[in-house]
Amino acid sequence: MSSRWLPSGLAQIRRYWDGDIGGVVFDPVSGDTHFLDALAFELLELADSHVLEVEALSRLLFEGTQALQDGEAHSRVHSALRHLQALGLLHEQFS
C-alpha cells in the first residue's frame, strides 16, 4: 500500500465491519489505534488509489443520494478528510 496521500512508512493495519459501524486502523509508527466511521474508513481506503478531490469523492461515495443533491455530501467528505488529516492518517492537502 503506497500512496502519496498516506504518511510514508505508515503500514496501517485495518479492520472493517460491514454496515455503518466503521472500522479501526492501527498505526504502528505512533502506536495509536483509531476507530473510524464508515465514511472516514472508506475515504482512507480510497486514498490508496485516488486523488483526494472533495467534489469527485463526494460524487463517487454519494452518487444517487439525497445528500449529494443537497450539497451535504461535500461537507461530510471534507469534514472526514480533515479528521483523517488531524489523526495523522493523511498527510497531503486535498482540494
Image (cartoon, helix red, strand yellow):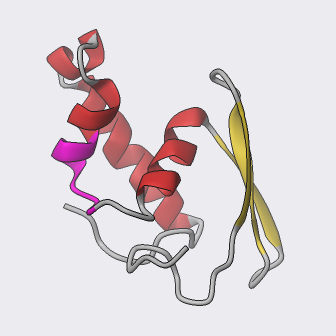
Q: Would you say 30 lies left or right of 20 here?
A: right
Task: Please tell me which residue lies in front, 37 or 64.
Answer: 64
Q: Taking the image as drawn, is residue 74 in sight?
A: no
Where does the image place residue 44, in percent across and percent down from the top left?
Answer: 51, 55
Q: Quadrant of the N terminus?
A: bottom right
Q: Residue at x 16, y 16 (%)?
A: 69
Q: Would you say 8 lies left or right of 82 here?
A: right
Q: Taking the image as drawn, is residue 75 in sight?
A: yes
Q: Residue at x 26, y 63 (%)?
A: 51
Q: Quadrant of the C terminus?
A: bottom left
Task: Please tell me which residue lies in front, 38 or 74.
Answer: 38
Q: Residue reaching furthest bottom?
A: 9
Q: Residue reaching furthest top?
A: 66
Where does the image place residue 67, in percent across and percent down from the top left?
Answer: 28, 17
Q: Residue at x 42, y 53 (%)?
A: 46
Please tell me whether residue 41 is drawn above or below residue 83 in the rendered image. Answer: above
Q: Would you say 53 lies left or right of 50 here?
A: left
Taking the magenta stretch, the answer to whether it contains residue 31 is: no
Which quadrant would residue 26 be assigned to in this image? bottom right
Q: Residue at x 68, y 77 (%)?
A: 11
Task: Please tell me which residue lies in front, 83 or 40.
Answer: 40
Where does the image place residue 89, in percent across and percent down from the top left?
Answer: 56, 68
Q: Would you say 17 lies left or right of 48 here?
A: right
Please tell me whether residue 16 is drawn above or below residue 27 in the rendered image. Answer: above
Number of numbered tags placed on the structure image: 0
Which quadrant would residue 56 be assigned to in this image? top left
Where does the image place residue 8, in percent across and percent down from the top left?
Answer: 53, 88
Range of magenta residues: 51-57
